[in-house]
Image (cartoon, rainbow, N blue to C red):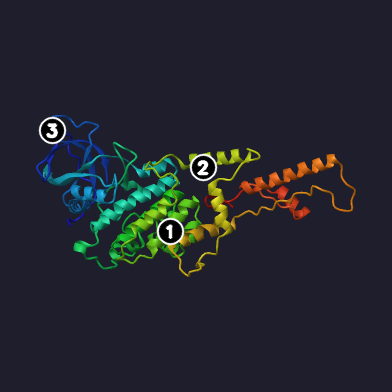
Amino acid sequence: MPRRKKGPPAPLPQGWTLTDSEKKSWRLGPIVGQGGFGLIYLASQRLDAPVSPDSGFVIKVELAENGPLFTELKFYQRAVKQESLHKWRTSHRLDFLGIPAYWGSGRSEYNGTWYRFMVVERLGSDLNKVCERNGGRLKTETVLKLGCRLLHVLEFIHEKEYVHGDIKAANLLLGYRDPRQVYLADYGLSYRYCPDGLHKEYKEDPKRRHDGTIEYTSRDAHKGAANSRRGDLEVLGYCLLHWLCGTLPWSSLLRNPLLVQEAKTSLMAKLPHSVLELSGPGDGMAAVALFLQHVKHLDYKDKPDYQYLRDVLVARVVRKDELLDFSRPEAEQQQQKGRAREKNNSGFGETASPRAARVRTAARGASRPGALPADGKETEADAGDQWESAILQRHKRTKVVPPARPLHAPSGQSPVTEKAKTTQAKRGVRWAKAERIANAQDNDWWTEDSEQENHQKQSLPESRWCTAEEHRGC
């Protein structure tokens, strides 16, 4: 691989023509982006007119002796041929696979300097800008759906003997024509982990320790080992965690890679509780805990169970459509709180939501973490259900409803009048109705064991059933 030279090249003039290795000519337009080693130009195949602002092509240009673009070119030439992409989408019944289209590449000389270039489809804004606009977070369902899409991309490139090595929001770009699509871009750090079907051996190189983006670097990369398939998935798991929580447990330690490495090692060693105890939406956190648990048990050369990981994420998705909602998560939370207030103020006859009923059932029947089922076998899916149920159980609120008062006077006492009977009957109906409401509502709890408990109950703020999403606030 050519020796890497730091810094982007001097800009090329607009209107300059580049000819690729297949003799196709491309006209350069204005600069629309810049990376650490190169510039990105708008481009067009029309040589007799200025490049349209709506052009669907861009050209990445670097100095010829730089390495990242050379690495990316080799990846596209070996792994991402249009016929192989079409075959993969057909065999996996996919309408879309988030890898940018490759249109050509070559070398060109300008003012005595040689440049390397690559033509790819034009993409839109990156996901990092979306996260920053949303306070660092994405909606739970968006994160889980995005994880499923990226698993399809990673499965494809892994099957082609490559790993990406630098998955992060800045390398995830929205479609230019269709912002609902997300592409995994920038393969400058991609690595051929399995050339000609022979997996490379695990080997630590002290000079390569902590390579990659420090927030998401895998434990293997922290030790100086090249990424394998498990490394890509570990990085993806950290990304999912970041998008759900808006931060990572080691976000304050980024200036010290060794401390970041220790924090990641601790989190992976203490799964699932290390993830479930973080402040984030319960359904999403449970899914990421299962995701990382699977990655934790992979050996360096193991092939991941991509379908299992997709099932883990999809199982927590309510809306199964393909749309990605990039609006602020806080708006979703306010809507949920508004619905909860409406429910509390709606009076008699309100019923519990199906989700709340499932949560109560899981909490009441939850066994301690680590307990095995009757047949002595435990799957990761079973373990995940136990983890979530155990956490919910710790925050369950007991409901004790006073019994209905008797409708008739005890024997030996004077009989009550018809009016008194009617009053007692109405009172019994009210008690029965109150019992039904208490069983249906998540937010009410009752206790009448003693005058002392009554006083404590009145002095406490209104209590609520604590779901997995809220367990950190209890």
Type of amino acid at the residue the image marks with label 3? Leu
| Callout 2 amino acid | Gln
Image coordinates for residue 155, horizontal then vertical, percent: 29, 55
Q: Is label 1 in a helix, a strand or a loop?
A: helix
Res. 96 image quadrant: top left
Picture coordinates of residue 370, whole percent (x, y): 50, 66
Q: Are dots 3 and 2 in contact, CB under 8 Å?
A: no
Residue furthest top as drawn? 49
Vertical relation: 470 (above or below) 290: above
Could you tell me if the residues under marks 2 and 1 are in contact, i.e. CB atoms within 8 Å? no
* Location of residue 148 in the rendering, given as x and y in whole percent from the top left corner: 36, 50
Q: Marks 2 and 1, Cα distance to the nearest angstrom?
A: 24 Å
Residue 461 shows in the view: no
Left or right? Give the position of 47 relative to 231. Answer: left
In the picture as drawn, the residue positioned furthest to the bottom comes out as: 376
Q: Quadrant of the N terminus?
A: bottom left
Dot 2 falls on a residue whose secondary structure is helix
User: Which numbered tag is attached to residue 188?
Assistant: none
Q: CA distance from mark 3 to mark 1?
A: 53 Å
- Of labels 3 and 2, earlier in sequence is 3
Residue located 73% across and 43% down the image:
430
The first of marks 2 and 1 along the sequence is 1
The residue that mark 1 highlights is 290
Question: Which residue was labeled with disc 2?
Answer: 333
Amino acid type of the residue that numbered disc 1 sits on in the rendered structure? Leu
Residue at the spot x=56%, y=39% of the render?
339
Residue holding disc 3? 47
Foreground of the two, 93 or 253: 93
